[in-house]
Image (tube, rainbow, N blue to C red):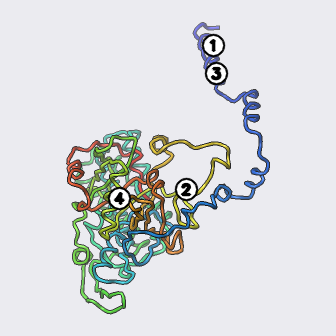
Amino acid sequence: MNRILFSFLLGGLALTATAQSGGISSEMLNRIRQAHPANVALTNALAGTAINQLALNPRNAEANDTYFSHKVPSKGITDQQSSGRCWLFTGLNVMRAAMIEKYGLGSFQFSQSYCFFYDQLEKANLFLQATIDLASKPMDDKTVEWLFKNPLSDGGTFCGVIDVVGKYGLVPDEIMPESYNANNTSRMASILSLKLREYGLTLREAAAKGEKNAALQKRKEEMLGTIYHILEICLGCPPQEFDYTLKDAAGKPISTKKYTPKSFYEEYVGKDLKNSYVMLMNDPTRPYHKTYTIDLDRHSYDGVQWTYLNLPVEEIKQMAIASIKDSTMMYFSCDVGKMLNSKTGVLSLKNYDYESLFGTNFPMNKADRIRTFASASSHAMTLMAVDLDENDKPKKWMVENSWGASSGHNGHLIMTDEWFDEYMFRLVVDKKYVPAATLKLMEQKPTVLPAWDPLFRNED
């Protein structure tokens, strides 16, 4: 046998033996079987019962405490239904609460469909323009790969609210009401994503053949015309102007005027969103009191590249308390699926006793969970209440959710302060509640993180 071939085969055998040494042998399997004797009763119980039902702690008194010492008034619970638009509902709920309070309105809502229409159009343009910008890069470039994996989604963050509302304004819900595809976004999203991937390849091929930027921009505009057409069919036609009568809580007309979406926003909100808010973050895997920004972490190509200030959770709480005491709601995001009792609407570390059920503990802390992708920001809600003890320390918090009035605690979720520490990720707070020294930290040059960083994860 050829000596080189023989050596290669021997090396292959050595590699195989090494690989096999890490497998489960029959002897190891026997030891594994004997390590934890079977609990027949639990096995039988779980055969027809959900894990959370057996692990539920019925003696958790926190599930029955619904009193709050400080609460921002709200009227009407919104419902995002089968869509990932929590970020949009939350941002609009912050603004509608202020408008309801200022004008003494009833259960008023802004049109989520109107904002969502332009959000999807802007995201499509962001993808197409980024594809043009990166046309010289290979398909397996990390950023190009990320773009084609994520051409468009219905999820997002507060910077999307800033981008869309600042550029396109707002309209009342009755002017552009929810459609089926606004409430059930998955099929529309898959169709749009497929079309965008097709268009992305077309633009790359045209650029590779030497097509100039002006020609690529013309192609992109034609492509966006098709995207607009699909959105119009699915969501309806966004109004350019409309007549609207504003009514108070008793239904009495306050005023009737003709508006454009921009003039309606300027009259009833009129806030410079881009320069009024600070995005705070609690990520113990990174240094505190530093700023971070994420490449492509925006909803429109010419929009806000949001900067996050990473702070200890106790500092974030003080700003949240100041805002609630001043009757101002906030955009808040967390890992909502962890330890949630959906029947009571309570998020508590004591809700479920998995340790007793399975005979093992789960000791990872927040930093461990972030590093191992076990926890991340998954859902946005409107922070609107806190219960403080006699020393002004928070005991629990409450958010206005967007899962309908029948979910949780009358459409709200209540979280213990301990749960807040472990699973809160982002808070957007008005600058007037931020200490001057903290605002000064926002002036530092942020660390730029890649688009695929775990912090990019959108709220759904």
Real-space Cα separation, disc 1 to disc 2, in angstroms: 53 Å
Q: Earlier in the sequence, mark 1 or mark 3?
A: 1
**Amino acid, disc 4:** Lys
Q: Secondary structure at mark 4?
A: helix
Mark 3, Cα crowd under 10 Å, few <14 / some 14-19 / many 20+, is few
Q: Are marks 1 and 4 in contact (CB under 8 Å)?
A: no
Indicate the amino acid at tag 1.
Answer: Leu
Q: In the rendered structure, are the residues bearing label 2 and label 3 in contact, judged by CB atoms less than 8 Å apart?
A: no
- The tag on residue 16 is 3
Identify residue for label 4: 123
Determine the residue located farthest toward the front in the rendered image. Answer: 390
Residue count near mark 4 (Cα–Cα under 10 Å), binned few <14, some 14–19, many ≥20: many
Between the C-alphas of marks 4 and 3, the distance is 48 Å
**Which residue is painted at 63% across and 13% down in the image?**
10
Q: Residue 255: x and y, percent?
A: 26, 89
Identify the residue position indicated by label 2 in the image.
339
Q: Which residue is mark 1?
A: 10
Q: Is residue 188 left or right of residue 223?
A: right
Could you tell me how far apart the alpha carbons at marks 4 and 2 are, in whole angstroms?
Answer: 33 Å
Circle 1 crowding by C-alpha within 10 Å: few under 14, some 14–19, many from 20: few
| Relative image position of residue 333 (x, y in whole percent) | 41, 58
> From the viewer's perspective, is residue 345 above or below residue 365?
below
The amino acid type of the residue labelled 3 equals Thr
* Residue type at numbered disc 2: Met
